Amino acid sequence: MHDGARIDITPEILLRAYAAGIFPMAEDADDPTLYWVEPRARGILPIDGFRIPRRLARTVRSDVFEVCSDTDFEGVIEGCAGPRRDSERTWINQRIRDLYGALFDEGYVHTIEVYAREPRRLVGGLYGVSLGSAFFGESMFHLARDASKVALVHLMARLRTGGYRLADTQFVTDHLAQFGAEEIPRHAYKRRLAAALDAEADWNIWPCDGSVTGEQALLALDPVEE
């Protein structure tokens, strides 16, 4: 059940919605209707104090993958819209693709791409919305072991280096909880959101061409390895 109502959403309305603490979803890929969602408890990831399992830290440090940013929005959203292990359904419909694609073109949506090296192919990634110093994570995917986790580590390192203050995950899953994700009440979230919107951050503090190494990402995070 969604806390919201049907609405015709434009890219501009979508940005205002994020600034107000709400976001859209669809029931599934075949349903053109979008709904506003405003969870009573909001998931966030700690930009300071981000936790990384030791085995994953070794994978990140090894640079087994090439990690880029903002190089293949269509590939990332296609991957995120693919079927999951527990369901053939996806909430990413064509309207979602069009809206976030428009915001990507305007510089408000960003992606992290993870490529296998030989042969080079997209095997994981994520995308989200950036406003002020807030980043709103939307979805991630993986086709190779640890690819989405490596994308998340590089994302959080970029956010911390770029001066972001809020990493929104919408909800907390078991997958995100291992990295320190927590739920906070709506009123506490809105206070953090307001502060983050009042500050500036720089997504492009690092290059987007795949030259950022895993070691650089780990050093930027100074993570708690568990």
Image: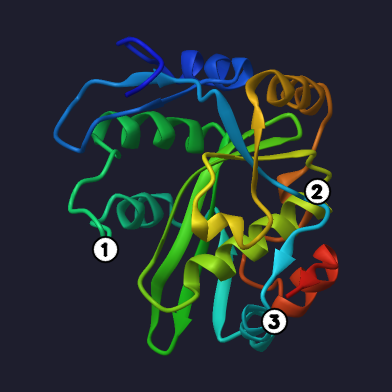
Horizontal side of 52 relative to 107 (left or right) equals right
Camera-side residue of 112 and 193: 193
Residue under circle 1?
85
Instruction: Using the image, tell me which numbered label, if any, was put on residue 54.
Output: 3
Q: Which of marks 2 and 1 is in front?
A: 1
Q: Choose top left, top right, bottom left or bottom right for residue 167.
A: top right
Q: How is the image coloured?
A: rainbow
Above/below status of 121 relative to 35: below
- Crowd tier of the residue under label 3, counting other residues whose Cα lies within 10 Å: few below 14, some 14–19, many 20 or above: few
Say which quadrant the N terminus sits in: top left
Q: What element carries label 3?
A: helix
Q: Which of marks 3 and 1 is nearer the N terminus?
A: 3
Above/below status of 191 relative to 61: above
- Crowd tier of the residue under label 1, counting other residues whose Cα lies within 10 Å: few below 14, some 14–19, many 20 or above: few
Q: Residue at x 34, y 10 (%)?
A: 5
Horizontal side of 40 relative to 8 (left or right) equals right
